[in-house]
Image (cartoon, rainbow, N blue to C red):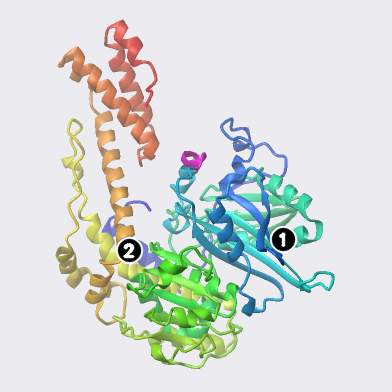
Amino acid sequence: MALQGSEEIEEQLAETEDVGDEDVSVSPAEEITLPVGSEGEEDTDPLLLPWDRFSAWLHCICVVGFDLELGQAVEVIYPHHSKLSEKEKTSICYLSFPDSNSGCLGDTQFCFRFRQASGRKCSLGCFLDHFDRDAPVCLKRDPGHYYGYVYFRQVRDKSLKRGYFQKSLVLISKLPYVAFFHSLLKLIAPEYFEKQEPCLEAACNDIDRWPTPHPGKILSLPVMGTVLKVRIPTCYDKPGTSQLVQSTQNDNLVSIVLPSIHEVDLFRCFHPVFFHIQMLWELVLLGEALVVMAPSPAESSDTVLALVSCISPLRYCSDFRPYFTIHDSEFKEYTTRTQAPPSVILGVTNPFFAKTLQHWPHIIRIGDMKQAGETVKQMKVKKLKNLKTLDSKPGVYSAYKPFLNKDEDIIKQLQKGVQQKRPSAAQNAILRRYFLELTQSFIIPLERYVASLMPLQKSICPWKSPPQLRPFLQEDFMKTLEKAGPQLTSRLKGDWIGLYRQFLRCPNFDGWYRNRTREMMQKLEALHLEALCEEDLQVRVQQHTEVEAVDLVLKLKDKLTQAERDQLPLRPGTLTKLQAHIDSVILSLPEDLQGILHKPSTT
């Protein structure tokens, strides 16, 4: 996220309000057209080895089958050199199949998330960090977890002892591109179930020819005779807008254009409980322990992902499991009664959880998801003691009292849409806009206050260390809310102060503040480096000893290395200018020192 002052944020919100109910705006985008066999700039990159492109998108592809003696087992891992620990394989096995009570006949798609084994380092780490830099916080690679995207098939087969063919094709990735990977599976999985492993090998070879996942560019991704066209959002995009991706007449293959790589249908997910959407927003914002009980992994995972995304552009910083089973390695940790439930959102389908998690403070019971055109009866929040089993009626079970007054307008607007048979995409856009404006109204006062902690640019001296940020003082921030609080942009009344106090104690604030602090420190480093580049270093060198000149060169080299490593937000040409300064200082020194200082750094 680019550093923003209060004026920029206010302008941004004003622009957002002008858009109205339409969620999608069209703006130009740069397109990378890399059809099969074309040689783009990235194709000739000598640093990219075979399977590096594949690894930029996926860790591996697994086939999980059911064995009568062994139970679920990983049958194939592709590429064959991909590494998974035994614990990771076990997690994938159990999470790739719906619980037996789900009764998922036919094809089912869902996703799960599990912890990465400790101690593993990615050989492409620095290379991939370059692309992560421009991605929104909610779309960055997950450093400690993998996502599993599942295509599960269960069909009757009398030739098998069990009477059913049961198998899952699973994509394992660090990227939270839910809509994209589900679309990719729809192309690969049916072909795989028909043609088996040769088809899988062909798909992986196609993926290994893709351009890297570069935010802000329209990518053409050929696979299995079809081209997926996508645009990965950037942190510089205006929130609530999306770029329009179009097919061109030059496309030789069939194109599938994805309007979003990561968004789920919020209205469909929240439809069974949409009278309580504002309360659910508060619970997610505050990092409260939440469990979603659903009849199938598809509904469970979609609902958890919808909850996590409802506070966008804020990143949900606690743990969340779109599909969680009793075999999960964190089962005991998350279900213990010896301590308060952790800050986590779990999606479950096994009836056993109705008893195991009945001490949790907030439970969402989702029935079979109705079609978006069906009317939902208004239901009150139910008391937790009324939740006996997973067969209990759908609804929200919680003793939570919201800080903000209920917004009746959004409920009426969505109800009217149902009555008038408004398209589901329009309902989804209205709800997404509502959540965005609510989150922005909440976060703008925090952004404004944190921007005020930044030292003035005139206080930056090139020959001293960059100045420090002023500390975040809770009471000082609270005082700003009287004149510059959320009431400037939101019509909602209620205990905003209480909501902020609770938020400042939760993991979502901690994650947001760490990220903003890091951005501002990098900005200070960049301003300091730019100030240094404006100085006449030759005059400085002449006024100091040879030893001090050598020390200056070493420090400048360190600055250059740090700026390149951290990808500081510098003005164009700054690094070239700094290198020229280093070279000019070295040339002013004796020849023996020049030879030593011109050697590349070994650190």
Can see residue 293? yes
Give the percent coordinates (x, y) of residue 101.
Answer: 62, 79
Residue most extreme to the right? 159
Number of the label disc, if any, that sits on residue 230? none
- In this view, 516 is above or below 301: above
Pointer 2 and pointer 1: residues touching (CB < 8 Å)?
no
Callout 2: few (<14), some (14-19), or many (20+) C-alpha neighbours within 10 Å?
A: some
Q: Which of 304 and 480 is in front in this view?
A: 304
Give the percent coordinates (x, y) of residue 18.
Answer: 41, 70
- Residue at 42 percent across and 56 percent down: it is 137
Give the percent coordinates (x, y) of residue 420.
Answer: 57, 88
Callout 1: few (<14), some (14-19), or many (20+) C-alpha neighbours within 10 Å?
A: many
- Residue at 31 percent across and 6 percent down: it is 591
Quarter occupied by residue 136: bottom left
Asked if residue 119 lies in the magenta stretch, the reply is no
Amino acid tagged 2? Pro
Q: Nearer the viewer, residue 362 or 554?
A: 362
Q: How many marks?
A: 2
Amino acid tagged 1? Ala
Residue segment shown in magenta: 122-127
- Residue at 52 percent across and 62 percent down: it is 113
Can see residue 311? no
- In this view, 464 is above or below 68: above
Label 2 sits on residue: 507
- Residue at 70 percent across and 45 percent down: it is 205
Q: What element carries label 1?
A: helix
Number of the label disc, if any, that sits on residue 189? 1
Dividing the image into 4 quarters, which one contains the C terminus?
A: top left
Closer to the chain start, of discs 2 and 1, is: 1
Give the percent coordinates (x, y) of residue 381.
Answer: 40, 89
Rounded to the nearest whole Å, what is the CA distance between mark 2 and mark 1?
38 Å
